[in-house]
Amino acid sequence: MIEELELKEVLQKFKKDLESFKSAKVKCALIGRSGTGKSSLINAIAGEEIAEVGEVETTMNVGEPLEHKGLLMYDLPGCSTSNFPKEEYLTHFNINQFDCIILVTSDRFYEDDLYLINELTKIKKPVFATRTKIDFSLDRAKRRGVSENETLVSVYNNMKESLEGYRVKGIYLTSSDFPQEYDLSKLLEDIYGSLSSFKKERFIADVNITSVKLLDKKREIAEKIVSRYSALAGANGLNPIPGIDIGVDIALMLKMSKDIREIYGLTEEQQEYNSQFIDKKHFKAFLSKIAQYGARYGAKEGIMILLKRAGAQVATKTASKYIPFVGQAIAAGIGFKMTSSIGTDMVNDAEEIAKEILYSFKNVN
């Protein structure tokens, strides 16, 4: 009886953790002047076209974030404009609500940017100073005979000098046209490090895969997701209602499959975004692998095939649930083990596809 109660408590904790992950929201503000590439940067972070790209300010209503699952990104104009005077800026946009601030420029930071950094520091908001469109600077320098490395060092040092005495989390040189190159990965890693608890998990689960390090972080989150769904299947094994087991387990596995595909970017929207960076031959092959993955793990028929391979365990689970206490613990154990095994295969196969896609880009970190 004591073991049974302890088991229920453990399974309940896993269930609560899954709910906390799914409900977590990360609010990130991108602040900068019109034309600095905020919308393109948002898309590069999400790995999906969620922001309209243009040369004029496209998002003026902070009440309508650009949503990417649990990641909410707000495209905010710079301060000290006629519409948004700097003295009222933090209050007007309710800056206290944000988990992180990405201060964006495509050339240099101005007096109003430095003012904003100081004000954000006072309210203990992490600021990530980001220079976009670095590829344009490199192209211009190359035409003058300056090497890429010299240009990167020069631009970084110039940014560092202009921000001397101001507290920022880091300086990042990025290009939305080449999301796997330069400092975008470092920016995402540092934002992750500034967050707490389930917001860390939510952020890593939702951002674009721009480096091997981020791919490894996604593995950690995916394995936690599998454990939590496995616990739900285990709790289902403890359910005294006859006949509920298999139907519930299939539904759980389909939800788990959807979460894992989203973590690894194996969705139609994210692959449409990736298509601009991958040659057509490789992209077509990736789409075929993703379709096969969906047929195996994302459809009821595919899950049933996987369950049939574990037929003996399923039969034991259904029969053992009527044995008081010990039998229920066995049923829970089988449900947990079966879901965990299939979930681990889901993660391994998804990671393999995501890794192939990542390595199809040049200069992967």
Image: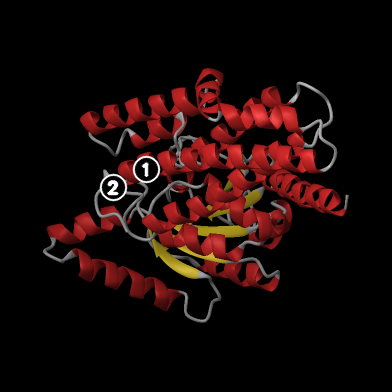
Q: For mark 1, does the 10 Å Cα neighbourhood hold few (<14), some (14 to 19), or many (20 or more) residues?
A: few
Amino acid residing under circle 1: Glu
Q: Residue furthest bottom?
A: 165
Mark 2: which amino acid?
Answer: Tyr
Q: Is residue 18 left or right of residue 286?
A: right
- Label 2 and label 1: CA atoms lie apart by 11 Å
Instruction: Judge whether residue 25 can be spotted in this image.
Output: yes
Task: Name the residue at the top extreme.
Answer: 301
Q: Earlier in the sequence, mark 2 or mark 1?
A: 1
Label ID, residue 352: 1
Q: Residues within 10 Å of mark 2 (few under 14, many from 20)?
A: some
Between residue 244 and residue 107, name the one nearer to us.
244
321 left or right of 67? right
Asked which secondary structure carries label 1, the reply is: helix
Q: Nearer the viewer, residue 317 or 206?
A: 317
Residue at 40% across, 78% down: 161
Relative to 241, say whether 211 is above or below: below
Q: Is residue 89 visible?
A: no
**Residue labelled with disc 2:** 359
Q: Residue 365 location, x and y as percent?
A: 32, 59
The image's colour scheme reads secondary structure
